[in-house]
Image (cartoon, rainbow, N blue to C red):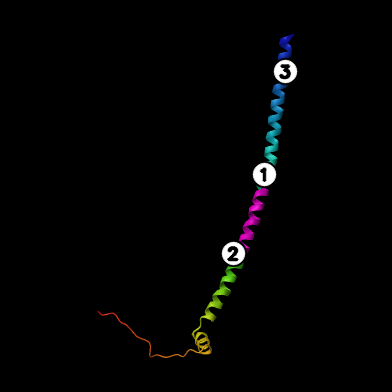
Amino acid sequence: MKRIKVRRKIKRGRMFVATFFLVSLISALIIKPIFIQVQQTYYTVQIQKYERSITSLQQENEALNIDIQQLSHYSRIVAIARESGYERTHTNIITIGKKD
C-alpha cells in the first residue's frame, strides 16, 4: 500500500512539473515578445525626442552664429567706438617684422 501511494505522488509531482513547465514556456513565448515590443517602442520614442532636441539646438546655434557675425562686423564696432568718444588714428600703430 505504501508503495502505491508513493507512485501516485511521483506521478502527481511529475504532472505538476510538466504542467508548470508548459505554462511557463507558453507564457514566456507570449510575454517576451510583448515586453520586447514595449521596450523597442519606448526607446524609439526616446530617440525621437533626442533628435528633436538636437535639431532645435542646431537651429539655435545657427541663429546665434548669424547674430555673432552681425555683431562683430567692423562697421558696427567703429560706430560704437565713435559713439563712445574714441577716434581712429593710425599714428600709434607700430609694425614689427621678423628679421630673416
Q: Distance between the residues labelled 3 and 2?
A: 65 Å
Q: Which mark is residue 20?
A: none
**Residue 78, placed above or below residue 7:** below
Q: Distance between the residues labelled 1 and 2?
A: 31 Å
**Residue 93, placed above or below residue 10:** below
**Kind of element beneath mark 2:** helix
**Residue 70, placed above or below residue 59:** below
Circle 3: residue type: Lys
The residue at the far left in this view is: 100
Return the residue at label 3: 9
Frontmost of labels 1 and 2 is 2
Q: Which residue is drawn at 64% across and 55% down?
A: 44
Q: Which residue is drawn at 71% across and 15% down?
A: 7
Return the residue at label 2: 54
Is 88 magenta? The answer is no
Quadrant where the image shows the C terminus: bottom left
Q: How crowded is mark 3: few (under 14 residues within 10 Å), some or many (20 or more)?
A: few
Which percent across, then down, holds residue 19? 72, 28
Frontmost of labels 3 and 2 is 2
The residue at the far top in this view is: 1
Question: What range is drawn magenta here?
Answer: 37-55
Circle 2: residue type: Ile
**Kind of element beneath mark 3:** helix
- Considering the whole magenta stretch, tell me its main secondary structure: helix
Q: Nearer the viewer, residue 47 or 89?
A: 89
Query: Which badge, 1 or 3, is on the more N-terminal residue?
Result: 3
- Left/right placement of residue 92 relative to residue 4 reads left
Circle 1: residue type: Pro
Q: Distance between the residues labelled 1 and 3?
A: 36 Å
Q: Which mark is residue 33?
A: 1
